[in-house]
Amino acid sequence: MHDRRGGGMILVDLAARNLRRHAVRSVLAMVGIVIGVLAIASLGILGASLSALVGGLVSNVSDTILVTPHVAVSSGDPFDPRNILASQISDRDVALIEKAAGQNRVIPMIRTAERLTAGDTAGYVTVYALHPDDIPLLLDAEAGRYPDPASPGVMVGSLLADDLDLVVGSRIGFGNESVRVTGIAAGRGMGIDINPDYAVIVTDARYPNEDPGMVAVKVADPADIGEVKAAIESQVNRRKEKVDVLDSREVLQLYYETMDAISLFLLGIGAVSLFVASVSILNVMVISVTERTREIGLMRSIGAEKREVLIMFLFEALILGVAGSIIGGISSALVGYYASAVASGLLGGFFVPEGAAAMGPAVAGYIAFGMAFGVLASLVAGLYPAWKAAGLNPIEALRYE
C-alpha cells in the first residue's frame, strides 16, 4: 500500500469491489441520488420555463397603463377572477382619462363573449371590440385585413385559427349570424391589455350601446408612466374610487416575484430529495464500515495508512455520487423538457419563441447544478463513515466479531 505508483487505482478498485459485493444496497443508494438530481434539475428547469414565459410579457406591456372599473371585491389585479363581475367605464370617465393622458393614445375596449361555430365545433369565445383605428395599434395582421365596420367580417387570433383550421375567407357562425373571417391576427402572447390569440376581434360598431369594460393607455415615453398614472387617478377618482389604474411595471414585478418564489420552492423540493438521498448513502456507508471492521484492521496491520483507508471509503461515496448524478442529469434533461412542454400547453400555448430559445443555457445550468450538488452531497455523506473507518484501532478491529 506504500507504493504510490498505481496506489490511487488500487483504492478505486477496492472501493468498486466492495460496491459490487453489495450490489443491491449500492444500487438503491445510487437510485436515491438519481431521484435527487432529477428532482432538483427538472424542477429548476420548470421554474426557469415559467420565468421565460413571464419574460415574454415585457415587450408587449412595458408601455401600458390599464384602467378597469373599480369593483368593491376586486384586488385591482386584471387577472383577478373576481373581475368577471359585470362592470363598465362610462363615456364621461373615458373622456376624463383622455384628458389626463394628454398626447398618449387612449384605447377603450369592450370585452365580451359570443357563441362561435366552425364546422362541427361549437362553443363560446372571448371577443374584443375596438375602434377600427385602434386595432392596428395592438395587433399585427398575419393574413388578410383588419375588421371593417362597413362589413360583418371578423378577425380571429392565430391559435384559435390553428385549432379550428380557419383561413381568410372561412365562414363561421358568430353570435346569431354567419360571417367571414377577414383576417388572422399574428400571435401576440399574453399581456395585461389584450390576449387575442384565442379570441375574435371586431369593431366597436357591433356593440353600439355598450360602454368599454377597460381602457388601455399606450404611453409614448415609458419614463412618463408614473406621471400619467397619477394624472388619471386624480382626474377620474377625484370624488370617489371609480376605476383601478394599473401600471404595467407593477404587473411585471408581481409576476417576477411570484415566479422567483415558485422557482425557489421547486428547487427546495429537489434539495430535500437530494438530502434524503445523502442520508441513504450515509446509512449504506456506516453499515459498510461496520461489516468490514476486521478487513479494515487487516489492511491497517499490513501497512495501510489512515489516509488511504479514508480515501478508499470516500471513493465509494464518490462512485455512487458520480454514477447517480450522471444518470440523473441525463434523465432530468428529458423530464425537464417534457415538463416545460406540458407547462406551455397548460398555459394556453403562450410561450414566446425568443424566451424559449434563451432557455438553453438555463437548462444546462440547472442540470450541471443538480449533478454537482449530487456529487457534493455524496461526498459529504461519506465523510463521517470514512473518518470513522480511518480512525479504527487495528488491534481492536481484528478482534471485532
Image (spheres, rainbow, N blue to C red):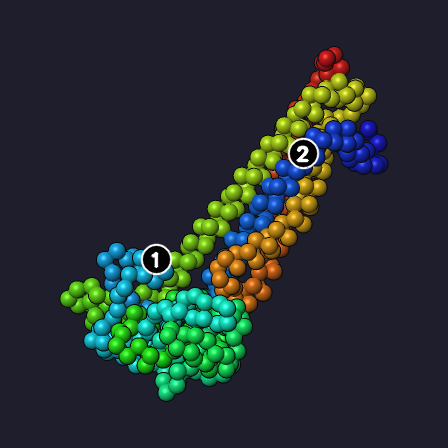
Residue matched to label 1: 81
Report whether 110 appears left or right of 334.
left
Does the residue at mark 1 contact the one at mark 2 (Cβ under 8 Å)? no
**Where residue 63 appears, x then y in whole percent?**
38, 72
Report whether 253 appears left or right of 390.
left
Residue drawn where x is 77% and y is 32% of the image = 20
**Where residue 38 appears, x then y in whole percent?**
61, 45
Residue matched to label 2: 28
**Where residue 15 appears, x then y in whole percent?**
76, 32
Mark 2, other Cα within 10 Å: few <14 / some 14–19 / many ≥20: some
51, above or below 130, in the image: above
Q: Quadrant of residue 378?
A: top right
- From the viewer's side, name the closer residue of 77 and 44: 77
Residue drawn where x is 42% and y is 58% of the image = 255
- From the viewer's side, name the closer residue of 169 and 63: 169
- Mark yes or no: residue 203 visible: yes
Mark 1, mark 2: which one is toward the viewer?
1
Is label 2 in a helix, a strand or a loop? helix
Report whether 351 appears left or right of 380.
left
Farthest left residue in view: 239
27, above or below 90, in the image: above
Q: Quadrant of the C terminus?
A: top right
Is label 1 in a helix, a strand or a loop? helix
Q: Which mark is residue 298?
A: none
Q: Earlier in the sequence, mark 1 or mark 2?
A: 2
Amino acid type at image mark 2:
Leu
Between the C-alphas of marks 1 and 2, the distance is: 47 Å
Residue drawn where x is 75% and y is 18% of the image = 294
- From the viewer's side, name the closer residue of 353 and 359: 353
